[in-house]
Amino acid sequence: MGPEAKIEAEITVRRALELPALRRGLPEVLAGGDRLDRTVRWVHAGEVPHIASLLKGGELLLTTGLGLGTRPSEQRAFIRKLADREIAALVVELGSRFESLPSALVEAARDCGLPLIQLHREVPYVTVTEAIHTEIINSHYALLRRADEILRRCTDVLLRGGGAPEVLRLLAVFTGNPLCLEAPDGSPLYAAGPESDDDGGPADADPLLAWEGLRDTGVRIDVPGGGHGPDAVRARLVLLPVNSPVAPVHRIAAERAADLLAVVMLQSRQEEVLAARGRGDFLADLAEGRISAAEAPAQARLLGFRPGAEPVLPVVMRLPAGLPTPGSWALLAQALREELAAPGVPVLLGVRPVEGRVPLLVALRAGQDRAALADRIAEALRAGVVRAGLDRPTAHRPVVVVGAPGDWAAAGPGLRHAAEAAAAAQGLPEQSWYDARRLDIELLLWRMREHGEQEVLTDFVERAIGPLLAHDRGARQPLLPTLEAYLASAGRKAETARDLNVNRQTLYDRLARIAQLLGTDLDDPQTVLGLRLALRARRHTDKP
């Protein structure tokens, strides 16, 4: 089933003509047949020449023609006044005044685009009025029921732990159009679009670009702030008519959701985390190829990131599992933003709470050293985590991975590479930051595990170092640390002995024991390579 916006609960002229009360009059459309989808707001019956002055627009006017005038000029003027009032349609019952409608009347209706219908049989106007008004009331009730249903679904999402972004995405799907939540100053906080169509195709328009192009013509709904003056409006919800006009039911649903959003946003710093999640969604879409390199600069500019012609540096920080808690993402987003202002370079930072990571793009200025900038960015990220109170003694430090600088075409793949490398780097010896280009082996092993090849990794580890692991499980003096130190020092035995704080003879005895257990030569380069890979692969298996 397509978007719910395709189902409209309203009565049109066409629908009114299908009702038995009017169908019994044998209606014939003489003009405006292409405009029968006009909405009928109300029904009015009258016979006076100046009746147009009594109408407000949207009416279906019933008459026998007594007030139409006798001269063609009067009849044309009568039609023009009704068209100026933007009534829905004129219905004239034949018999009392006319056997057939005058040509001047019909021609004027065609010229004005006013639906003109003649009834060949008499019908009780009260019956027609009652039938159409009942239909209008029922359609309004249907609108309210649909608006109530979307409000209930939004409430359910919040009760299940969702937030404003999830509510906005539900509204976008319901309306079939993109929408945007603006800050009071007009800057975008979060943009959402309808989901892909039933065939899995992409949404018709990027919500952020749609907001930039159509925000002046969109329907704006205030999210109340609960205060007075500048605090009266907390945000504004903008419905964007991209795929279809904004229907009455969409406005009703958005007005009710705005009250719900107001409650959600009363929590401290909700605007901060909303904006950070919006930037995080943009960076995730860029990484996954849902935003092209040609579109990216314009969208980044709307989000406040203007690197100019400088290359951009992709960076991803991955937080330990369980940190931060759902309630602390807003505090973290604010702390990170403030700390990243210190390096004095353009930065676009987002948050991705579900994945537990913070992606960002940093402008690398001409002549600026990548490693020095990475040091400053990693230090700022670390300081933001500490400020947010997420520096727990029992938790691992966040993993920061820095990719290679490049243009916008390289930014998306660079972000994706850095995000995967950050997942693969978990459990490595702690560093202030890791170079994504030096984590390719870790990334290869991690991808094998993620793609269902963990059994292959486990078998490889068992073949390579299984006997050593079995020895250590029951030994008072484990040998695995000796092998790790030996390989870390590239086989330099004096350095290994110093690192382990043992004498050389003790080291030689341990290495001989390791070689005996594994049945291999520790001086053979191929053996050393296999052991290095096995130690790295062990981190990506469930086996201790």
Image (cartoon, helix red, strand yellow):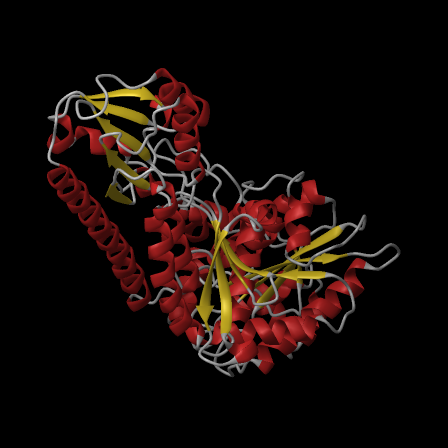
Percent x, y of residue 289? 56, 40
Residue furthest out toward the right? 367
| Left or right: where 17 falls relative to 316 | left
Snapshot quadrant of residue 431: bottom right
| Image quadrant where one finds the C terminus | bottom left
Vertical position of residue 136 compared to residue 71: above or below: below
Percent x, y of residue 345? 77, 64
The residue under the point 32% across, 30% down is: 68
In the foreground, 178 or 270: 178
| Image quadrant where one finds the N terminus | top left
Percent x, y of residue 487? 63, 60
| Left or right: where 24 falls relative to 217 | left
In the foreground, 455 or 288: 288
Q: Is residue 374 visible?
A: yes
The residue under the point 36% across, 41% down is: 50
Snapshot quadrant of residue 429: bottom right
Vertical position of residue 149 compared to residue 342: above or below: above
In the foreground, 4 or 126: 126
Vertical position of residue 477 compared to residue 220: above or below: below
| Left or right: where 167 falls relative to 391 | left
